[in-house]
Amino acid sequence: MDFVFATSSKIAIRPANLTVPGAKLLAFLRFHIPQRRKTKVESGIMESMTSLTEDSATTGEEQGGVRRRDFINVAAASFAGVGAASVALPLINQMNPSADVLAAASTEVDVSAIAPGQAIKTIFRKQPLFVRHLTPEEIAAAEKEPVSNLRDPQTLEERTKAGKKQWLVTMGVCTHLGCVPLGAAAGEIKGEFGGYFCPCHGSHYDTAGRIRKGPAPTNLQVPEYAFTSDTVIKVG
Ligand code: FES
């Protein structure tokens, strides 16, 4: 918007002129404009300058206000997050298993004393665990059966560790209803397939611990384990 004022000598005042400091502008007008008109012009310009100044101040205040509100919101959210974390972390830590529970979560078994053809029963997570040292004949019996004939098809290799297929490690829990099968201790019945036999309802497992006869739906479970040395396994 341009302001043009006609006087004895023509004067044009444009918005850019408004950036001139007020004192200089007013002195300029007093010199060039007659007194009667000077008052109207001065008052008009002063009104414009005041309006501009007020608008500018108001806008700056709003911007400053918005920034302050944003800062307060962000700060409040941050404090809330830190507060929630400081409350939640101790609760979550409290739910972590204690040292004795962690120790019970894994079991180490020394297998050096288990001769071929023997097995032992031990405990893993409060359940029976069988560790069996297979003879070459028991390995051959497990390998000769076509996997396609099995209810729960698995090879002996898939149920043992690489290079250690003479060591069969399984849970001692029948997969039918959870009885403890026979066949791990000396003199116990091993069933029709030379592995384990569950007398509860007559499930027969072979020398790889696979279900071969009876109601059990799946093979004896092989837990997570690893050899920590040639003669020690860590289960869990
Ligand atoms: S629980 Fe083993 S056969 Fe039923």
Image (tube, helix red, strand yellow):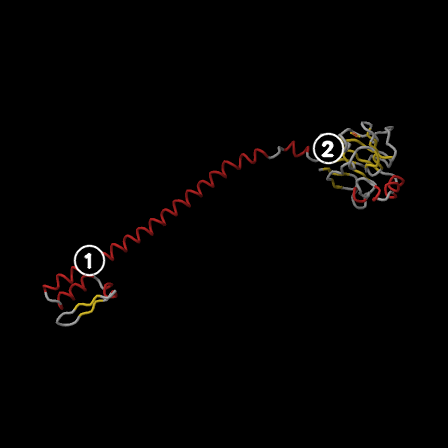
Q: Which residue is mark 2?
A: 124
Ligand 1 lies under 8 Å from the Cβ of mark 1:
no
Tell me the quarter of the image containing the N terminus: bottom left
What mark, if any, has residue 47 been given in the picture?
Answer: 1
In which quadrant of the rendered view does residue 181 lie? top right
Residue 228 at least partly seen: no
Dot 1: element: helix
In the image, residue 71 sits, relative to residue 173, either above or below, namely below
Left or right? Give the position of 23 relative to 129.
left
Left or right? Give the position of 229 relative to 73.
right
Q: Residue at x 12, y 71 (%)?
A: 8
Q: Residue furthest top?
A: 200
Q: Residues within 10 Å of mark 2 (few under 14, many from 20)?
A: some
Number of the front mark, 2 or 1: 1
Which percent across, then down, holds residue 185?
Answer: 83, 29
Q: Residue at x 90, y 40 (%)?
A: 137
> Depth check: 156 or 120 in front?
156
In which quadrant of the rendered view does residue 22 lie? bottom left
Left or right? Give the position of 109 relative to 14.
right
Ligand 1 quadrant assignment: top right
In the image, residue 75 sits, relative to residue 45, either above or below, namely above
Which percent across, then down, holds residue 159?
Answer: 79, 42
Q: Earlier in the sequence, mark 2 or mark 1?
A: 1
* Type of amino acid at the residue the image marks with label 1: Glu
Q: Residue at x 71, y 30 (%)?
A: 126
Q: Are marks 2 and 1 in contact (CB under 8 Å)?
A: no
Dot 2: element: strand
* Type of amino acid at the residue the image marks with label 2: Phe
Tell me the quarter of the image containing the C terminus: top right
